[in-house]
Image (cartoon, rainbow, N blue to C red):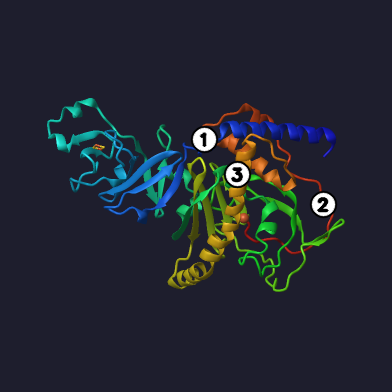
Amino acid sequence: MNAVDDRLVRKQQTTINKLFYEQVPALGMRNYWHPVASGRQIGRKKPLALTVMGDEVAIMRRNGKLFAVANECPHRGSRLSRGTCEFPGSNTVTCRYHGWTFDLEDGALMAALTDGPDSPILNKQIRVRTYPVEERKGIVWIWMASEEPVPVEEDIPPAMLAAEEVHIVQRHVRGNWRWHVENPGLGHATMLHRDSLYMRFVDMFGFGKNFSAPLMDEGNDGEWLQERMADFGRSAEFEGLGEWPVHRIGEVIPLAEMPPVQGVTTIVSVKVPGIIRITNFPIRNVMYYEWFVQTDEDHYLYFQTCCSYAKTLKEKISFWLRFFAWGRFVGMIRFNNQDLAMIEDSHDYAKRRGFNDPIPSYRPDQFQIAWRRYLLKFGRGFNFPEMDEMEVETAQPEVVVEPDKAEPSTASS
Ligand code: FES
Ligand SMILES: [Fe+2]
């Protein structure tokens, strides 16, 4: 890149970053469906209380169907998640405190039980806010915007809808969703995860080269922003320091070619409004997705899913053994805990400095810039003409290191 190009790229990146921090809500994109629970958490008698994007919500089941309402009674604010169903067979919730009873379909006050059937309060058109909620693949999806929702299938990756089984791991963690969506980027995996048990025996490479971030359809999973590198360096001499990485005893598993999953070969991809997809993680032949649903200013729900396509009993047993004996704990929990610690640090750092403070970026951060541009350009409800005019440079000049034949194919989120 010559100096003029370099200046142009910097200028474009500054525009992207500025818009990103101004326009992308720290509490999350309300106008998308987000996963917030497993369907199993919500029984017939057991409402679930949650904070989603700053709103307190109660999710409950009536006659098999899910309903979500603001978790406060309009009378004196008692939490409706403590409420009861006083009229079995109806889709209502009755507040535990004084018995105001609401229709869960539209939130309308239907009765104030302790004031008798002729209670004049009924004429006041009192309502509790309702939220659209759906259940697909054993997951509870919620729509937090006040506009009419799109069909929930529009926001669920097609290859998840096609899965035979979807397994969930979820945690409430500290940080901000925007940092976690930007966690891919080949800069972190070969450093942060090198000592994880998940990667300890893998002969890992050191650094990627010639990054690019195409936005494209691949296989049966629609359009994603894909993280690519044309080449990688296994190890190199760093001036004045020595060689890195140094081959360690026990790194015996070669970086092998991984099978395509649902026709997808790219290892790491990202999609609006902030979904990360990894093929063959935490075990082979599965599709892994994760969402980051902000709850309050400092916390989000880290929602991880593993989709299996095993059909026959033999395939299923093989999946269960590999998933429950290894992948779930060693991959989805232990390995990803390493990322969580970093996201928390970045969150504190951004709070100390102010979120809009530009952070220095190095070549692997190209993917983050490409992601920001993609979100600003194609995120639902966004329309910034500035984004149409610019092409962000993602290809990078070659780094000279020893060429290596093997292909990188380890998961890296
Ligand atoms: S607070 Fe709910 S009925 Fe009084
Ligand atoms: Fe990671």
- In three-dimensional space, the C-alpha distance between marks 2 and 3, rounded to whole angstroms, equals 33 Å
Placement of 291 over or under 9, stated as above or below: below
Going by the numbered disc 2, the residue's amino acid type is: Val
Going by the numbered disc 1, the residue's amino acid type is: Arg
Residue at 44% across / 61% down in the picture? 165
Q: Are marks 3 and 1 in contact (CB under 8 Å)?
A: no
Q: Is residue 35 visible?
A: yes
Which quadrant of the frame does ligand 1 lie within? Answer: top left
Query: Is label 3 in a helix, a strand or a loop?
Result: helix
Q: Position of residue 180 (x, y in %)?
A: 58, 47
Mark 2 = which residue?
Answer: 399
For the residue pair 397 and 181, the one nearer the viewer reads as 181
Mark 1 = which residue?
Answer: 380
Mark sitting earlier along the chain (1/2) = 1
Mark sitting earlier along the chain (2/3) = 3
Mark 3 = which residue?
Answer: 348
Placement of 410 over or under 67, stated as above or below: below
Quarter occupied by the C terminus = bottom right
Residue at 53% across / 58% down in the picture? 287
Residue closest to the far front: 352
Q: In the figure, residue 402 lies in which quadrant?
A: bottom right
Which callout, 3 or 1, points to the residue nearer the camera?
3
For the residue pair 120 and 278, the one nearer the viewer reads as 120
